[in-house]
Image (cartoon, rainbow, N blue to C red):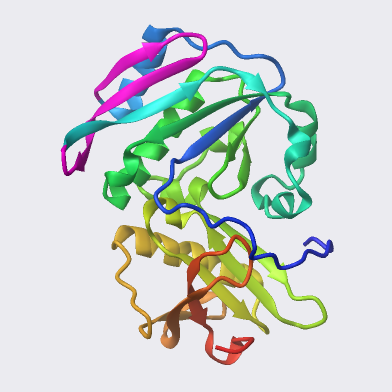
């Protein structure tokens, strides 16, 4: 738990739905770009057929030949870009962002203090892919990067604000599109000062043109709500978001999902920054605030 007080601020920019998925690898020492042959082999192992269309100290680019983006004027492979090593300013992260780095709580300050270098990677044109295909491709790219950069100390996922030790990325047991949920979606937790109210929301689903979730509640273990949020996000990804305003989903009883309890969903403006539309979950007798 964090006892630092933050202010609601919905004046900033909204995340651009479908924007690039950005992975930042953090290092304690400068890291050279792997050679073309090694990069191509790692990409093919994890992603499938690729074509390297550029490679130097500044940039390496690969066309993912099995992942085709379709546009009105033609079809082109999705591009995967890896940038050369640059300096990393860890102090650029504010306290609000760091407060929600739950997966690296014990190490986050040390990482930002000791890691002075970064290598960024991203996808391009991937917004045209179906959500499950893009989720798998981005997770496959992460696998390739983890292999190519063994000296990486930590992975920072810019779209959702998650930070992981590299060893936790490499040793994860998650399979399929849920890999994207694990690394590309962050379930955040806040308490409302002066009340018993709590708020759990997610950040990162909009990268796949899917809705983020929001729970404003009291009287329930927030860990149960966070678990529900990740499970529900996984369901939305697997089923291409079938949820409409006014529909209900299974709620939680005793920490487990229960069909006996139905929570109503409705699209609303987010209560916590960044400003965006979210799928708000009305938790019945646990619900807080006005709807």
**Which stretch is magenta?**
49-73
Nearer to us in this view, 254 or 287: 287
Residue 23 location in percent, x, y? 52, 35
* Whether residue 157 is visible: yes
Eyeballing the image, is 248 above or below 139? below
Residue that appears at 39% across and 60% down:
210
Magenta run includes residue 48? no
Residue 162 location in percent, x, y? 60, 47
Residue 206 location in percent, x, y? 44, 56
Q: Is 87 positioned to the left or the right of 183 in the image?
A: right
Eyeballing the image, is 241 above or below 103? below
Q: Where is residue 227, by image quadrant?
A: bottom right
Q: Is 271 positioned to the left or the right of 69 in the image?
A: right
* Most common secondary structure along the magenta stretch: strand
Magenta run includes residue 51? yes
Residue that appears at 63% across and 58% down:
12
Eyeballing the image, is 20 above or below 205? above
Q: Is 222 positioned to the left or the right of 14 in the image?
A: right
Image quadrant occupied by the N terminus: bottom right
Nearer to us in this view, 162 or 10: 10
Residue that appears at 37% across and 8% down:
37
Residue that appears at 47% across and 43% down:
173
């Amino acid at each position: 738990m964090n006892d630092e007080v933050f202010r609601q601020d919905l004046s900033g920019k909204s995340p651009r739905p479908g924007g690039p998925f950005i992975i930042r690898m953090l290092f304690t020492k400068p890291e050279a770009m792997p050679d073309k042959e090694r990069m191509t082999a790692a990409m093919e192992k994890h992603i499938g057929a690729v074509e390297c269309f550029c490679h130097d100290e500044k940039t390496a680019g690969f066309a993912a030949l099995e992942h085709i983006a379709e546009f009105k004027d033609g079809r082109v492979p999705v591009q995967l870009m890896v940038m050369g090593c640059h300096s990393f300013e860890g102090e650029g992260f504010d306290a609000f962002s760091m407060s929600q780095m739950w997966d690296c709580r014990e190490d986050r300050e040390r990482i930002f203090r000791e890691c002075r270098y970064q290598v960024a990677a991203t996808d391009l044109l991937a917004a045209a892919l179906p959500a499950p295909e893009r989720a798998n491709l981005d997770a496959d790219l992460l696998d390739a990067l983890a292999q190519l950069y063994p000296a990486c100390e930590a992975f920072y996922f810019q779209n959702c604000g998650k930070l992981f030790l590299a060893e936790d990325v490499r040793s994860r047991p998650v399979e399929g599109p849920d890999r994207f949920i694990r690394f590309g979606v962050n379930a955040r937790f806040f308490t409302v000062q002066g009340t018993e109210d709590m708020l759990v929301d997610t950040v990162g689903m909009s990268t796949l043109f899917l809705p983020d979730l929001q729970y404003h509640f009291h009287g329930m273990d927030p860990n149960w709500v966070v678990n529900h949020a990740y499970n529900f996000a996984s369901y939305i990804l697997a089923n291409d978001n079938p949820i409409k305003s006014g529909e209900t989903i299974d709620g939680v009883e005793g920490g487990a999902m229960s069909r006996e309890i139905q929570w109503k969903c409705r699209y609303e403006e987010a209560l916590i920054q960044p400003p965006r539309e979210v799928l708000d979950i009305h938790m019945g007798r646990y619900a807080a605030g006005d709807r």
